[in-house]
Image (spheres, rainbow, N blue to C red):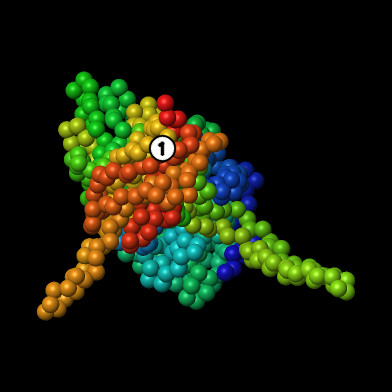
Amino acid sequence: MRRFAAPVIAAFLAVGLIIPAGFGAAAPAAAASSVPKVVIVVGPSGDATDRYRSEARAAAAVARGYTPDVVEIYSPNATWPAVSKALAGASVVIYMGHGNGWPSRYRDELYPISQDGFGLNPVAGGDDYTHQYFGEAAIGSEVRLAKNAVVLLNHLCYASGNSEPGLPEGTLPVARQRVDNFAAGFIQAGASAVVAEAWSSPNYMLRAVLGGNRSIETAWRQAPSANGHRLAFDSQRSHGFVAEMDTETASSGYTRSIVLKRGLAPAAILAGSRGSTAAPTAVVVPSAPSLAGNVTFQAPDIRALTSAGTKVTLVIHYTMTGGAALPKGLQASVRWDPLDVTGPVAAQPRAEVAPTGAAATASPDPSATPVASSEPAASPTKGAAASPEAGTAATPTPAKKPRAVSVRKPPTGAKPTPIVPPVAIDPPPAALDLVVAERIGDVVAPAPVKIAKSTIGLTVALPAAPGRYRLTVTLHDPHSVVYDAATQVLLPTVTVRVTGDFDGAVLATPSVQLTAGSAATLPVRVVNLGRMTWGIPTIIDPGPVARSGTPAVPASVVGHWIPLSDGATVPADPAVAETSVDLPIGLASGATADASLSLTVPDAPGDYLVMLDVVTPERGSLIAAGWQPTLVRVTVVAVP
């Protein structure tokens, strides 16, 4: 895939770009009392964020050659309240960050709440990884740009019709929908042109908008990044607009697009300017909403089997003070941080909280085994999120051939030394990818909760890999804005054990003191946490004469003695070293069974462990499957 074209001076002359000596020469069409306002936004983009900020600062320097009203909002302070406030009256908007468009694999239909907009910091002062989407619904309803504004989207997934690296780019009809959809919210906010470039910086089009004398369409067609495979179609989302794409080949490579009003010229953009000639002041961001002082929350709880990859109801009990009530439209998002995962951590669904319409019930099952436990809040683990990246591509260095390795022959009569062939190491990538897929686990996806008299409930999708996770719930106001820190600390963080297909737990006293050589009974409680039933029932052979058939085979709890201290020894007799007891046949998923293990205590005093395991005829040992055993510490004392 061709990533970059060298800047062509002739292209700039063809569009009639004016290289400004200062602001006065740049915008003769603008009224003396107003100038074009340029807003540049860099969203949290993982490891690419630094390059985004560098490219954005370069664009800001270009913009200031034409207008003094340039506002820069960069991660980690690019929140929706800050960005939406700054966008008011903007003639040019530049955004670099994550792109979340439609059609995509994440949803079956367009979801305007989070798609086709910005990927921003949930709260100011966070990191460059965690991000929250504010889609076309928020942009179209809460933002009012200047008349004939232009929006430049650079290095996004989906915006120019592309997909994500590692995923199929899709068909041309799919790419056309992505282009049309991504522009729709900005056009509702007042834009007359939306330009998307997967690889190039915004500087060429920025100069074309603020200092050119030919149409925006002509400038886009003659850009240095032009591929020469243009196609056009009427917008289905924005009446009166036309969309154009410039593919890398005749049928693939959806890296450039524009949706605009035909005939749009820089003079019309400058005539609609609403910026100030005075140096712009800092954007005054509204204070974060708060629930502190009015509500008390208990720890989130799940009273159901937490099977990996399923959806469960998360319930949070609350009490209000002073006659206050929780706001209608309250939203919540969840974050799963792996603590002890038994398998590979698969990518989680983009919406960790179930979409609107899948609101949870608020009545937990009191008979189920609780699997969530309170834990002091901890900082989320910083993910290595990747995002559509920006910057200028470095010229790749050709890979060198591996140096030949010579092997000396051993002396005559000596034992030959095995010859190990050199390991072939893959060469470096042929080019630097400037658009890369995000890590879904870093997406904050709020969804409405169901509010009852004393509980709020939400349906959450559990991680796909079994193990222990830290679950953090974040509250958002009805506009998806995160509540302040004082509100968030009211919600305790919990740990959740996410169970697999073959899973279980053995409950027993953690420690006991026994007399050497005695006999004892250890009560245990066994829970089948997996999806499969344990134990094979009796199978009766069919036929006219009754036959015994195949006998039943139960699952069992097994205990192993393990010496710990000096002098502690376990006899070789298996009857002493190991003990077991059968469980009921057909122990179903989620069922509990009580049993008693008969222990023969070793004769040697000392410290021991009794390691408890479950062995089933279907899958064998739980410990062998990767789960931690239950351990009972036994202090064996001498006979008095």
Q: Residue at x 75, y 70 (%)?
A: 419
* Viewer-side residue, 50 vs 54: 50
Amino acid type, mark 1: Gly
Where is residue 581 drawn, in percent x and y?
31, 50
Where is residue 623 drawn, in percent x and y?
42, 52
Residue 321: tell me if it is visible. Answer: yes
Kindly give the residue lying farthest to the bottom in the view shown.
544
Q: Is residue 47 above or below residue 248?
A: above
Kindly give the residue lying farthest to the left in the view shown.
544
Where is residue 221 drawn, in percent x and y?
52, 66
Q: Residue at x 59, y 45 (%)?
A: 50
Where is residue 348 drawn, in percent x and y?
39, 53
The quarter of the picture where the N terminus appears is bottom right
In which image quadrant can residue 548 be found? bottom left
Helix, strand, or loop for circle 1? Answer: loop
Residue 36 in the figure: left or right of residue 534: right
Q: Is residue 307 above or below residue 142?
A: below
Q: Which residue is labeled 1 in the image?
A: 517
Residue 75 in the figure: left or right of residue 356: right
Q: Badge 1, how many Cα within 10 Å: few under 14, some, many 20+? A: some
